[in-house]
Amino acid sequence: MKRMALCVLLTLFCLVPANALWALDNDIKEIPSCKYCGMNRETFAHSRMHIDYSDNSKEGLCSLHCAAVDLALNLDKAPKTIGVGDYGTKKLINAETAFWVIGGKKPGVMTKNAKWAFAEKADAEKFQGEFGGRIAGFDEALEAAYKDLAEDTKMIRERRKMRKMKMMEHKP
């Protein structure tokens, strides 16, 4: 019986892709900032994303907004796994099985229309009770990210323009 259990465990271990284990332990260390906006992924561990593609490339991003950009730019690369930071624990979880809360009063990362992920439905419901929004699956959250992309890009450009102007005002 012990021998059979050991065989099952070893088989399961071999079936887990090495990249998935890498992502769980080292995604922030290996990719500390988002390639599109430069945001610190440790600071935004609660919204960060990690994509492992079928060609064994990987991307670390700050949010669903930047992950949507990456997925759109890499149409020929199939994602093997997509991870997202659990809002409460900041641990990387499977984005496709997560419970997403779209919208609500809590400001989002890189978006006006927030999209937060939770490993447990009860946590998503608790968050929804406090901040509003609606619970959805990954496909709906990704679709919302694509729909929001134009307005969010405009908002980000305006913020950066204002920040640059403030920096110029304070230069001697």
Image (cartoon, rainbow, N blue to C red):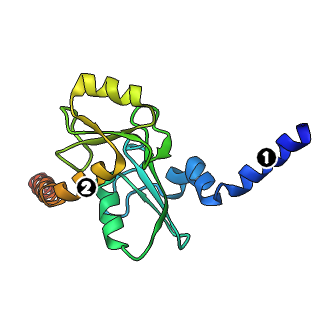
Task: Give the camera-side residue of 170 and 104.
Answer: 104
Q: Quadrant of residue 30?
A: bottom right
Q: Where does residue 51 sit, x and y in percent of width and height?
A: 46, 59
Distance from the alpha carbon under mark 1 to that under mark 2: 38 Å
Query: Circle 1 is placed at which residue position?
Result: 8
Picture quarter with the N terminus = top right
Judge whether 154 appears above or below 87 on screen.
below
Q: Quadrant of residue 121?
A: top left
Query: Circle 2 is placed at which residue position?
Result: 143
Q: Where does residue 157 sit, x and y in percent of width and height?
A: 14, 60
Judge whether 132 appears above or below 14 on screen.
above
Marks 1 & 2, CB-CB < 8 Å contact: no
Q: Where does residue 127 sit, x and y in percent of width and height?
A: 31, 27
- The reply, left or right, for residue 61 in relation to residue 28 is left
Q: Nearer the viewer, mark 1 or mark 2?
A: 1
- The reply, left or right, for residue 48 in relation to residue 56 is left
As helix, strand or loop, the secondary structure at mark 2 comes to helix
Q: Where does residue 146 sit, x and y in percent of width and height?
A: 23, 59
Mark 1, residues whose alpha carbon is within 10 Å: few (<14), some, or many (≥20)? few
Mark 2, residues whose alpha carbon is within 10 Å: few (<14), some, or many (≥20)? few
Task: Give the camera-side residue of 34 and 8.
Answer: 8
As helix, strand or loop, the secondary structure at mark 1 comes to helix
The disc labelled 1 sits on which kind of residue?
Val
Picture quarter with the C terminus = bottom left
